[in-house]
Image (cartoon, rainbow, N blue to C red):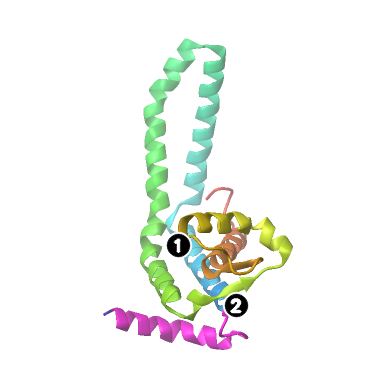
Amino acid sequence: MFDVILNALNTIFNPIISIDPTPSNPVLTVFIIAFIISLITTVANKLLVDQDEMNEIQQRSKDFQKKFRDAQKRGDGKELAKLQAQQAEMMKDQSKMMSNSFKPMIVTLVPILLIFWWMRSSIISGIIVQMPPAAYYLSLTPIWHFIGQFIYGGHPSTELVIGWLLWYMICTFGMSQILRKYLGFKQGF
């Protein structure tokens, strides 16, 4: 069964590797896959989550927290009691917000896991991306290398390089932000 899935994913993604100018080091392929995954997750968020309702709940929560902190600072017992009575309603809103934010994850989890599985078992797992010094340090890569040395032992073979997973994370973060802006997402959702 896994071979069938792997062959299907190879059929989908091997053409992307073949158009990569450096197929032995498919940096562009990871960038394209990051774009595809970002597009899937962003569109799922846009279609499955009521953005206006989520922003409204988030704003009510911020307002409630501000009122609560102000009442605590003033030592206003009556206001605190009133706000604590409203706290159950705020918890319902928070629960609704959490359940709404899980909807896209449920839909996108299996395809994303399959793509990651394919990436890990393909030529992509061996790529190393050479970064310009500014990008290397701004992406906090030395910290990731230190954590990797601590967990796995060894040392990075060369400075200014990252593996496919960190390259994917950098690409997908950037792509997600661009797509969210393009699709008209408001602030957090």
The local secondary structure at tag 2 comes to: helix
Which quarter of the rendered picture does the N terminus lie within? bottom left
Residue 62 location in percent, x, y?
53, 33
Q: Report the span colored magenta.
A: 2-28
State the residue in front, 105 or 78. Answer: 105
Q: Which quadrant of the structure image shows residue 110?
A: bottom left
Q: Is residue 8 left or right of residue 26?
A: left
Return the residue at label 1.
44
Residue 33 vertical position relative to residue 108 in the rendered view, above or below: below
Residue 157 horizontal/vertical position (percent) = 59, 69
Q: Type of residue at label 2? A: Leu
The residue indicated by pointer 2 is: 28
Please tell me how many numbered marks the rendered image carries: 2
Label 1 to label 2: alpha-carbon separation: 24 Å
Could you say which is closer to the camera, residue 70 or residue 28?
28
Identify the residue shown where x is 38% and y is 55%: 103
User: Residue 62 versus residue 56: which sits nearer the camera?
Assistant: 62
